[in-house]
Amino acid sequence: MTLASVAVRALSLGLIVLAWGACSESKPSPRPDAGVHPQACERREDCPGGQVCAQEGVCGSCESNGQCRLTERCDAEARVCSWREGWGGDCARNEECALGAWCHQGQCLPRIAVSLCPSGTKDECPTGQRCNLGNLVCEEDLGCLEDADCGASEICNTGLHACVPRCTEANGSLVCAPGERCAGSRCVQCVESAECGPGFLCDAAGRCAVTPRCYSDRDCRVPLSCHVPTGACLERPPPCTSDETCSASQRCDIGTGTCVPRACQADALEPNDSPSVAFPVSASQYLELTLCAGDVDHFAMALERGDQLGVNVEGDPLAESSFSTVILDAGGRVLSSGRMLASFVAALPGTYVVRVSTLAPAQHYDVGFFLSRGTPCDDDGQEPNDTPSTAKPYASGTVVEGVICPQDMDHFTLSVPAGRGVRATLSNYSAASGLLRLCLFEGSTELGCSEDPSGAVVALPAGAVGGKTLTARVSGDDARATNGYTFQVEFP
């Protein structure tokens, strides 16, 4: 063997040893390193490699999905933003795809693999999807970060991370749910915590809550996920493999590996399906309650004059529209109502009933009762006249002194003489205490309304109302309004 061949063999052996040593030393995948001089940024788009723009104004690792784009998630191990499952960056417009293909969630797909929405409406899409107005294809509804992510008639509630119907002061009473008002073009329960009942704060979604809560995984640090029914960020449970790995009220769906509710079972406070068997409660929280199909839960609480009762139902916020929470007096009169929140100040001592129900087949919920002191609103002598069916007849030439309490409406029937018109007025009220609204109806048809800080006036000619029976309705422009008023009617 020559000296040269020995040198070649030695060199080869050395390379093999080095290669083996390199392979045998397993090193973890490094996280993104901003380097000695981290890159400055103002937004997520300024950062490369899936990094995010941190509060310090430099690019770095992500800590929650909320720091990534809607179409991305924060990888719990690498701590960089990566595409959500089913999303990509191959295209943004249909024109970027081959002939016959459609741009769907950033990927070019054949026509058979996509659902179209040619009219550009969400109603054309399957449940859980919304229309991409640029490409007219249905895509997974990921919520929103700004108004541009929503339809023309919607606005982004950034606290909920969801597109909600856009409202105005004029249509707020029609668009918003009971207990909500229109503020900043969106329906909210509150703008400030002072507007909520005792023990509540106003969260980023404009809802009254006992503590700040999550509404989606974007609110939680990875690897935690949002448990929407409780609003808590929790460890994601491992996939179930049998019923034994689920709670007693659940069973394992083997196909999805998730625990789902068993057939609805009554909670420990049943029977409380009517006011006569209402469960007596105190200022406390009651957990793990259940509303089965057609079920209504009633709770009874003794209040003294000036006691302010706040009721907060905690359940799936995405099912809020199906809930109803009502406070009743001993005679069954509705004193306050809302979806998952209601509040009332007692004017008279006695036992009051809280009724909780849902339109959904079944719902699990917790409920809290909170007590503080408030200023009671005393009924006027015209009550009960909260509905058209209980309207009080108006005697011509008289002056009615009335009071509007929170969530109150007063109704009066007017018999207009033949050949006469009508002029109804409201006066002697303070707009600072809540603007009042006066409306006249023939049956269910609205004939005219007025709300003016200096006094409401509705006047109708004889040709429209002569010889007819009308209903006058006095209400607050806000469900929390408390105000006195003077009501008069003339028949010119």
Image (spheres, rainbow, N blue to C red):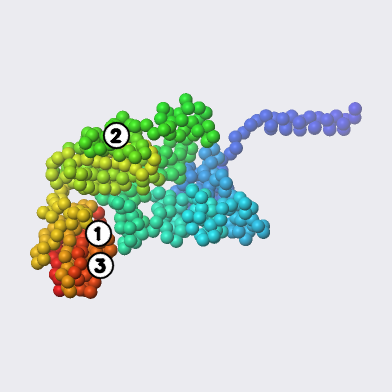
State yes or no: discs 1 and 2 in contact (Cβ < 8 Å): no
Give the crowd class for mark 2: few <14, some 14-19, many >=20 residues within 10 Å: some
Say which residue appears at 27% left-offset and 64% top-offset.
446
State the residue position of label 1: 477
Quick one: 43 or 236, which is closer to the camera?
Answer: 236
Say which residue appears at 52% left-offset and 36% top-offset.
256
Mark 1 and mark 3 lie on one chain; the one further toward the N terminus is: 3
Q: Amino acid at mark 2?
A: Tyr
From this viewpoint, is residue 283 visible? no
Secondary structure found at label 2: strand
**Relative side of 45 to 165, left or right:** right
Say which residue appears at 29% left-offset and 34% top-offset.
286
Above or below residue 133? Residue 332 is above
State the residue position of label 3: 448
Can you give x and y, in whole percent of width and height, for residue 249 in the image?
41, 30
Quick one: 440 or 345, which is closer to the camera?
Answer: 440
Badge number at residue 286: 2
Q: Amino acid at mark 1?
A: Asp
Mark 3 and mark 2 lie on one chain; the one further toward the N terminus is: 2
> What whole-number distance in Å separates the C-alpha atoms at marks 3 and 2?
46 Å
Can you give x and y, in whole percent of width and height, for residue 413 in the image?
17, 61
**Relative side of 453 to 396, left or right:** right
Can you give x and y, in whole percent of width and height, for residue 306 in the image?
15, 44
Mark 1 and mark 2 lie on one chain; the one further toward the N terminus is: 2
Residue 136 location, quadrant: bottom right
